[in-house]
Image: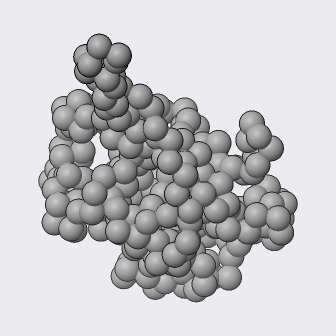
Amino acid sequence: MSIVVRIAVGLLERSNDPDLQEIAKWVKDAEGRVVDLVLDALGQSLKTTGGVDAAKAQLNQIRSSANGMSTDSLDSWATTTPWLVEQARIVRTIAALAAWRRAIYLKGFFHDANCTSLWHFPTDEALIVQVANGVLGEPELPAIGRQIRVYLLPPLDITERNAMNRSIGANYSAWLPSANVDALPHITTLTEDVVSISEEVQVTQTNRRGGVTTKSETKVTKAPILQREAAFDELLDSLPGAIEARDRDLHQVRSKLK
């Protein structure tokens, strides 16, 4: 089972509803567009109720019509850039389940299992996560760096990440300026084997007269994607707990108002 499918299955298996547990068994064999629709349904259910039970009717409808669905456009890239396709599916998973609250802190990114990644979804526009040829002709994920901003922080333990996610959930408008994202390194390009990271650095220069000046320059670093399985696992395994920490207060208030 792929790690993307594992997230969807894990959310369904946590339910006490035997029908949803049965759907979890079916999802284990689902691929491509079917999985994307399942993730969308789960994301909407988490958004409205804080759980997955509300997705039951929609999931049953998806299962009933699965045989007539078209092939996922990512499949056409699976032979030439198989790892980039898997990365795209992971990005889709995170976006589907987390984008509605605009930001989330997770453990790791594709090139580094230990760092902290801050995923920021700054607008309400529909997210399109597809593989496409970049300016230089190399396949990449255009959504990263454009629709989805990913910032990198030093390693944080789960208690620290939970606290930061709760601050997003408590008041996004107050959190955003305090996060100071413009000062953080961020991902500009994600390809099959490389993550391009941009950051502002201070450069000191000495002129002919001995005077010293300091200016800000943009530095771009290309980090290879090496320990894929470890990084992918850390990233996705941190997602359910991050969502729970971020959205807990909202769902507790909603439950009291029912």
The quarter in which the N terminus is drawn is bottom right
Taking the spot 68% from the left edge, 76% from the top edge, the residue there is 30
State whether residue 55 appears in this view. Answer: no
Tell me what residue is drawn at x 60 percent, y 57 percent: 194
| 192 left or right, relative to 166 | right
Viewer-proximal residue among 46 and 58: 46
Left or right, 141 with reference to 184: right
**Image coords of residue 60 (percent x, y):** 61, 69
Q: Quadrant of residue 226 in the image?
A: bottom right
**Horizontal arrangement in the rendering, residue 28 relative to residue 72 (left or right):** left
Q: Nearer the viewer, residue 106 or 226?
A: 226
Above-or-below relation of 121 to 177: below
**Location of residue 237 in the rendering, given as x and y in whole percent from the top left corner:** 40, 73
Quick check: can you spot residue 25?
A: yes
Q: Quadrant of residue 66?
A: bottom right
Asked if 187 appears above or below 177 in the picture, the reply is below
In this rendered view, identify the residue nearer to me: 144 or 26: 144
Q: Farthest residue toward the top?
A: 209
- Residue 238 location in percent, x, y? 35, 69
Q: How is the image coloured?
A: one colour
Q: Residue furthest front?
A: 209
Q: Residue at x 31, y 23 (%)?
A: 206
Q: Residue at x 38, y 78 (%)?
A: 15
Query: x, y percentage for residue 156?
Result: 23, 63
Q: Is residue 69 left or right of residue 113?
A: right
